[in-house]
Image: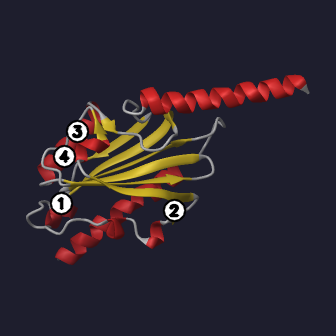
Amino acid sequence: MARRLTVSLVAAALAVAVGGAWLWFGRDLPRPAALRAEPTSALYALVDSRQADAAPVTVAEIFTPGTQTLGDLTREAVEELADCDDALWGASAPGCTQALRATYRGSSVAGQFVIFNLPDGRTADALVAALRADGFVRQATPFDPARSRAEVRALGHYVTVSWLGATTAARGTDLVRPLIALDALGNAIQARVLAAT
């Protein structure tokens, strides 16, 4: 019994140390283990520039009451960052006027969705390329980056980043289904395309 208690205490101390190290040292540096990045396409031509799509995105537009839960994921927090670069490390977003971010948590995964409002499709594609190569978004909620996946997309003059990882030591955690659900938050931009037709 004393041995079991010691093992439990050591495991708890290790978990606290890992969490503390994440908060103190590694928060700005992690990248996803698997990353898929896409430039904008002709589908988003009607919202290819802020000039053609001038209304700012709102928290209510992207993070609706219907997206409070996404499958097993539940939204924990939503924020609009004062400076887009506050959401990034190793990359910058010139001309960006907005960055909205939400964090989600499930039973064995956690993740975040970030949307950037850039001047045009060219600068959106440049940010996608930078996130593929040079830096990434800052991790806003704890999960294991070594067991994480991300989708980065330019959608006209917007860039969305969906990043999700495992929160438990269990192997074989399904990341694909919850990442697809998280990435679907970007569908709000398709509604803007339809409104512009």
- Measured in 3D between alpha carbons, the distance from the residue under mark 4 to the one under mark 3, in whole angstroms, is 6 Å
Judge left or right: residue 157 versus residue 20.
Answer: left
Q: Quadrant of the C terminus?
A: bottom left
Judge left or right: residue 11 versus residue 190.
Answer: right
State the residue position of label 2: 70
Q: Decide which of 163, 20 is in the foreground and name it.
A: 20
> Circle 2: is it few (<14), some (14-19), or many (20+) Cα within 10 Å?
some
**Which of the marked residues, 3 or 2, is nearer the chain's N terminus?**
2
> Could you say whether the residue bearing mark 2 is in a helix, strand or loop?
strand
Q: Position of residue 6 (x, y in %)?
A: 80, 24
Callout 4 amino acid: Asp
- Measured in 3D between alpha carbons, the distance from the residue under mark 3 to the one under mark 1, in whole angstroms, is 18 Å
Q: Which mark is residue 42?
A: 1
> Could you say whether the residue bearing mark 1 is in a helix, strand or loop?
helix
- Measured in 3D between alpha carbons, the distance from the residue under mark 4 to the one under mark 2, in whole angstroms, is 27 Å
State the residue position of label 4: 125
**Which of the marked residues, 3 or 1, is nearer the chain's N terminus?**
1
